Image (cartoon, rainbow, N blue to C red):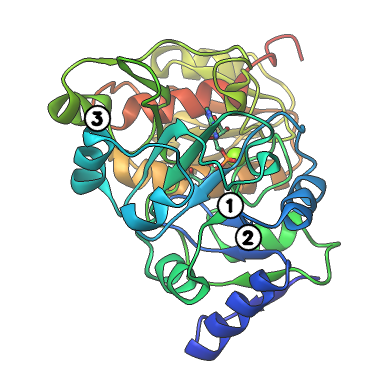
Amino acid sequence: MPRLVQPTDEAIAQAARLLREGQIVAFTTETVYGLGADTFNVSAIERVYQLKGRPARNPLIAHVLDPAQARQVVAQWNERCQRLAERFWPGPLTIVLPRGALVPPAATAGWSTIAVRAPAHPLARRLLGAFGSSISAPSANRWGFVSPTTARHVAEDFADVDDLVILDGGPCEIGIESTVVDLCGAVARVLRPGAVAIEHLRRVLGKVEAPQITAQAASPGTWARHYAPHTPAELVDGSSLRSRLDALDAPVVVLCFDADVVAAPHCSIVMPGSAKVYAARLYDALRQADAMHLEQIIIETPPQTQGIWPAIHDRLQRATQGNEEQ
Ligand code: TXA
Ligand code: MG
């Protein structure tokens, strides 16, 4: 089993030493847990890919303390990045820029661009401060599976990795991954919706494109089926939930807003109506539903579409892709 460690000053210093030695350290961020490696250490980066089972063409996010550290990994830091960083960093916004000349290509899976983000969680910031340089980290889950929002989730996913240290900063407050915005072109493009809503980006940048991305070429983490539980999952509108459940004989588990709609033999996990609380709860609920090993997970489609609901809808779509026939 991996080692869960409370984030004392000594533990943070030790984790920074491990990173310097080329080891992997899992750590809390405000979005989801990350599986961290020294951005400048190629064999440490390779170990992250191997542990995660991640396709080699899928680049990692470089986590930095602030714009000064970001400048060490990007080739150009212009006025647009500065404005975004001033408004949203530290926080759940990842900015894609041309990769700096000193960064090994392995850290970005050979891409000439690099994604950078300054996380807000105090544990992540203490670790970055102690390490003193950029930490590359994907979400700390096995590839394609639901992201982890607690240290226990990480320990479960990597139960067979004895030398993995997990710094336990408690449950992630936001619970879904950062917004990824590409600033390489003339017009900013959202590659992955997240907790920073597109309307907030538009207030800072003016025009922002938000194409519907499903192809690997545009942003590798945006494969259609991603963030998915092992149990087949299906999205169902609230209005047809009752009739859909009545038609099913084998017990299923339902992520719904009102437990009264769900009768035996089915089980319910009641989800909160507030977007913030829903996002913070989502991945744990999916993992909990998965662990019940029932025929199917049914998810009631949240009716709302504003603020961070689009990011939640994006994750729900990906969690349920390709399951209709199963
Ligand atoms: O909230 C988050 O972003 C979490 C925490 C740990 O920071 N990290 C995370 O990493 O979600 P990961 O590796 O699971 O997803 C990173 C996504 C990729 O799937 C891809 O869409 C995008 O960031 N990305 C990374 N580098 C990129 C690049 N050079 N160009 C375009 N997209 C990139
Ligand atoms: Mg991920």
Give the residue number, with chain letter if any, for mark 1. 136
Give the residue number, with chain letter if any, for mark 2. 38
**Badge 1 residue CB within 8 Å of ligand 1:** no
Image coords of residue 275 (percent x, y): 30, 38
Residue 155 appears in which quarter of the rendering? Answer: bottom right
Q: Quadrant of ligand 2?
A: top right
At 48% from the left and 42% from the top, the residue drawn is 282
Work out whether residue 254 can be spotted: yes
**Residue 35, above or below 239:** below
Q: Secondary structure at mark 2?
A: strand
* Observer-nearest of 104 and 140: 104
Q: Are marks 1 and 2 in contact (CB under 8 Å)?
A: yes
Instruction: Give, as a three-letter code, the residue at label 2.
Output: Asp
Instruction: Give, as a three-letter code, the residue at label 3.
Output: Gly
Image coords of residue 199 (percent x, y): 20, 25
Side of 189 relative to 203 (left or right): right
Image coords of residue 296 (percent x, y): 69, 28
